[in-house]
Image (cartoon, rainbow, N blue to C red):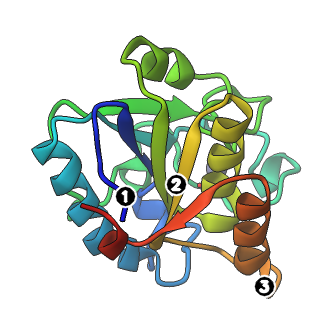
Amino acid sequence: MVKVTYCDALIVVDVQKDFLPGGALPVPEGDKVIGPLNRYIELFVSKGQPIFATRDWHPENHISFKENGGLWPKHCVQWSEGACFAKELNLPPDTFIINKGDRPELEAYSGFQGTLLDTLLRERGIKRVFIGGLATDYCVKNTVLGALNLGYVVFFLEDASRGVDVTLGDSKRAKEEMLEKGAIALKFEDLK
Ligand code: VGL
Ligand code: ZN
């Protein structure tokens, strides 16, 4: 059992319309993370602990888009419908929103890359982060590894994450890499 306490924060990664079934870059079963994440959100709210939500926030001319030489279809363009958080995701009004990938020439799979996330966590005395969302093999993985590198204790919320699996097994390998580097896999039942 893990008890949520004063040094803990929840980080919800990229639960945006474009990553859900029907979106521009759909993650298979991406919508399945919403129910579990809502339970984590409710628990963190009830404990008075902060919630951060990252969002992919690309300009039209972003380097990661196929038309600009990148890997991905155009997705999560700033201010577009597809960049909005999933409407069923119950983020409280005081959620800290972290935009990433907002510079044309830089890809940012990690929520720490080019953002104030580390500063905001530090200012609040956060030592442990609970990370889940989309996609396990890209932004969740890189956010988890970023947090480990910065010295946080990191819990990977395996019941609240799904991967794109461009290559079969990517999400499984991502999980193995996160655990090997020190993350702790967690399901909601393990929490109190
Ligand atoms: C992501 C691919 C491209 C993610 C973002 O949020 O995992 N994946 N941009
Ligand atoms: Zn992106």
Vertical placement of residue 123 versus 175, above or below? above
Mark nearest the camera among 2 and 1 is 1
Q: Which mark is residue 169?
A: 3
Question: Foreground residue, 146 or 1?
Answer: 1
The dot on residue 2 is 1
Of the two numbered discs 2 and 1 on the same chain, state the one appearing first in sequence: 1
Residue 105 shown left or right of residue 143 in the figure: right
Residue 155 appears in the figure: yes
User: What SS does tag 2 mark?
Assistant: strand
Q: Nearer the viewer, residue 190 or 139?
A: 190
Q: Residues within 10 Å of mark 2 (few under 14, many from 20)?
A: many
Where residue 179 appears, as percent x and y from the top left, is 71, 63
Pointer 1 local density, CA inside 10 Å: few below 14, some 14–19, many at least 20 = few
* Label 3 element class: loop
Tell us which disc is closer to us: 2 or 3.
2
Do callouts 2 and 1 mark residues in contact (Cβ within 8 Å)? yes
Residue drawn 46% across the image and 75% down it: 30
**To which residue does mark 2 refer?**
155
Quadrant placement of the N terminus? bottom left
Disc 3/disc 1 C-alpha distance (Å): 28 Å
Between disc 3 and disc 1, whose residue precedes?
1
Quadrant of the rendered image containing residue 88? bottom left
How many residues crowd mark 3 within 10 Å: few (<14), some (14–19), many (20+)?
few
Answer with left or right where residue 68 lies relative to residue 144.
right
Which type of secondary structure does the marked residue at label 1 adopt? Answer: loop
Q: Disc 3 residue type? A: Gly
